[in-house]
């Protein structure tokens, strides 16, 4: 399951506020309000990660299908080229949003779980773990895109590119599965 099934209203609002209609921020504790706000901000970053990782999954899946004889080299190449279109822009967006989130002050301490923490703190921690996991997969995707650019420019050989691709492909498979598990876990937590 992927995080893209998250609340469209939060995504449309930019994830800045996760305040449900009719709720009153004054009725909640400052920590609960801080965690609700942090959760909403994290969802925005998680949605950017999901969009970026959709491209990487397409790239990986094309290789999987090619290896299993389900598609031809020309079909795989077309899928790979399609997955790279705009990928660096989406990677940059995810990294920019993630950096901004990490530099932003938070009224929600999710570092140490406690028995009496709010649902919003649990939800914020689950989304943050998803984002942390996405970082590794996105870094691997970026390395591969840069390698492909270097190959096209003649700065690395086809043999070197293929060796690196096979390592990145295997690593990417593990990372995207790990990300999907974390995203599924994050969807099990709600902050409403």
Image (spheres, helix red, strand yellow):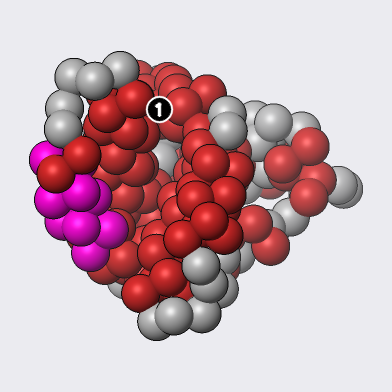
**Image point (46%, 61%), residue name:** 73
Q: Position of residue 137 (x, y in %)?
A: 31, 49
Task: Report the magenta stretch's main SS.
Answer: helix
Q: Position of residue 30 (x, y in %)?
A: 51, 38
Q: Is residue 181 above or below residue 25?
A: below
Q: Position of residue 108 (x, y in %)?
A: 40, 41
Residue on which disc 1 sits: 95
Report the span colored magenta: 160-170
Q: How many marks?
A: 1
Does the rendering let one see residue 78?
A: yes
Q: Is residue 124 magenta?
A: no
**Image point (34%, 42%), residue name:** 141
Q: Quadrant of the image for the N terminus?
A: bottom right
Q: Is residue 8 left or right of residue 87?
A: right
Q: Is residue 66 above or below residue 29?
A: below
Label 1 neighbour load within 10 Å: few <14, some 14-19, many 20+: some
Q: Is residue 14 above or below residue 111?
A: above
Helix, strand or loop at mark 1: helix
The one nearer the camera, 9 or 173, is: 173
The one nearer the camera, 39 or 44, is: 44
Q: Position of residue 67 (x, y in %)?
A: 35, 74
Q: Quadrant of the image for the C terminus?
A: bottom right
**Image point (34%, 25%), residue name:** 152
Q: Is residue 8 above or below residue 85?
A: below
Quadrant of res 157: top left
Q: Is residue 184 left or right of residue 139?
A: right
Does the rendering let one see residue 184?
A: no
Q: Is residue 169 magenta?
A: yes
**Image point (20%, 49%), residue name:** 162
The one nearer the camera, 41 or 173, is: 173
């Amino acid at each position: 399951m992927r995080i893209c099934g998250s609340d469209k209203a939060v995504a449309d609002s930019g994830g800045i506020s996760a305040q449900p209609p009719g709720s009153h921020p004054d009725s909640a504790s400052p920590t609960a309000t801080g965690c609700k706000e942090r959760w909403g901000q994290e969802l925005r970053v998680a949605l950017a990660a999901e969009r970026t990782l959709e491209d990487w999954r397409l790239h990986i899946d094309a290789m999987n299908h090619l290896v299993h004889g389900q598609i031809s080299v020309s079909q795989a190449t077309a899928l790979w080229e399609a997955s790279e279109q705009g990928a660096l822009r989406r990677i940059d967006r995810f990294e920019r949003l993630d950096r901004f989130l990490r530099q932003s002050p938070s009224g929600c301490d999710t570092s140490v779980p406690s028995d009496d923490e709010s649902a919003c703190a649990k939800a914020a921690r689950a989304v943050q773990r998803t984002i942390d996991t996405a970082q590794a997969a996105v870094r691997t995707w970026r390395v591969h895109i840069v390698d492909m650019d270097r190959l096209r420019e003649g700065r690395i050989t086809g043999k070197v590119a293929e060796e690196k691709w096979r390592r990145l492909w295997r690593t990417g498979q593990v990372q995207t599965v790990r990300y999907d598990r974390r995203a599924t876990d994050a969807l099990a937590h709600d902050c409403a």
